[in-house]
Image (tube, rainbow, N blue to C red):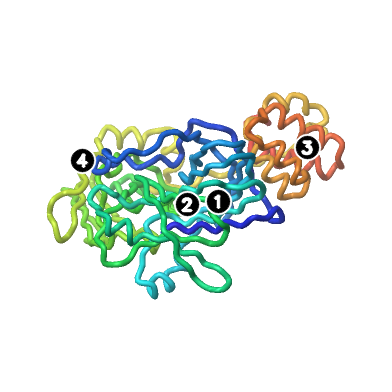
Amino acid sequence: MLYCSVRATGLLPTISDSEQSGLNLQPLPVCQSCVHIVDSDQWVQVEPSVCTDEGGSEFRISTPAGRFECSRTRMRWVCAGDVTLQYSAGDGRSLRAELERLQCERIGPVIDVTVISGKLEEAHLPHYACLAELDRSFTESVKVLNVEDDGLTFESVELTRFHAKILQPYFSPKTVLMKLGIPVKVHCDLLIFMTHKNPIILHVYFFPSDSVFKEKIKVEEKSSQPISCPRPETPLRMMKQHSLEVPGASVQPEEIKLRGDIDPNFFKVKHPVVDDIKMSLSRVDDPKSVWTATIWKEELDKTITSKGASSLYQHGEMQTKPQVSVNFDKVKFFDKNWCALIKSVKNVNAIADKLLQEEVISEEMYSKITHLTSTKEESMREICCKVRKSSVHVKNLFMSVIQEEEPSLLN
């Protein structure tokens, strides 16, 4: 299910804009089953600025006319003029009761979009269904559910390899659904974390390619050490029990059902680490492996002895690093160094996010600072000019934001 709540308004608090970037933070699936299906590459990838709190991450971006793809969520859009978007990847669990009533299930992440200014010609919402083995009956079963004040309506959608395309979208909450009962395989992601070094204890997550799931898992495992491992290159069957075999290790639970409507479960693996760790995933009703991988002993040794990992280990368990506070006269520091800050600060969009949130800068200034055509130096000059003419409180607040976002500059 792709849920896109898109509202045309300039009154909501904004989060941030972006710079064009080649960095793919939420990469497209690497699926060998549907590699023959052509997917358009005529997209400019952009990275939005991010504001993260306990409720998750929110994104904001301004783009000129063109075809763009968000590096964080993989959402795409086409616009004939300047647009400013604010969006977040949300939790789809609130829709479970409605989906059960409709006998539908979601096949994509939940995305909530607000159009701050401008107009979208097309919206391309990411889905994780693999289209390789699916026929026309599947594509006909996929609809967009419009959640409106006066009820629910459906509309057809055009499916591409990784996206659901909506032309001239009108702005109400939307969800892309497929009917239950149609067997579908989905593109899946993999995350592995080490929580204990002697013996090795791993948490192994398989889950549909959903940025919300991924973020929640990383937050949950923030005190663990990530282990790099190839993700599945073939799709996995939804709503089927899978088991993980790891020779020489204890694995709990014995089976996990791959689902998209609840937070991902994980396999807990306890291994003595006398050799490489070999893993094989298979469906319970089909013993053929759907994914295999090996974590080499040398890689584990390097992870355990690395500077980052060793600083996190205490008595074999992973711990979080303490935060170091920096006490100094912020107003005096700003007055003396604001020229240097203009040239040195890199994380401008994140700083602009917080200044907007604290009402230090206006909505208009924020859009100008975070526009794609603005350089970091130009944006910082705008900010410093504003702060330099402001009160002692604003200068203190600004330097506190710098301290949080660019702590290395203060060393």
Determine which residue is flagged by label 4: 274
Image position, residue 187 (x, y; %): 31, 49
Residue shown at the point (53%, 51%) measured from the top left = 168
Q: Earlier in the sequence, mark 2 or mark 3?
A: 2
Q: Earlier in the sequence, mark 1 or mark 2?
A: 1
Left/right placement of residue 87 relative to residue 234 reads right
Q: Are marks 2 and 3 in contact (CB under 8 Å)?
A: no
The quadrant holding residue 237 is: bottom left
Q: Are marks 2 and 4 in contact (CB under 8 Å)?
A: no
Left/right placement of residue 328 relative to residue 125 reads right
Q: Earlier in the sequence, mark 1 or mark 4?
A: 1
Image position, residue 240 (x, y; %): 24, 61
Q: Earlier in the sequence, mark 3 or mark 1?
A: 1
Q: Nearer the viewer, residue 30 or 322?
A: 30
Specify the label residue 330 is tagged with: 3
Amino acid type shown at disc 3: Lys
Q: Are marks 1 and 2 in contact (CB under 8 Å)?
A: no
The quadrant holding residue 98 is: bottom left
Q: CA distance from mark 2 to mark 4?
A: 53 Å
Regarding residue 411, the answer to whether it shows in the image is no
The quarter of the picture where the C terminus appears is top right
Image position, residue 398 (x, y; %): 75, 40
Label 4 crowd (10 A; few <14 / some 14-19 / many >=20): few
Amino acid type shown at disc 4: Val
Determine which residue is flagged by label 1: 57
Determine which residue is flagged by label 2: 166
Q: Nearer the viewer, residue 219 or 144?
A: 144
Q: Nearer the viewer, mark 1 or mark 4?
A: 1
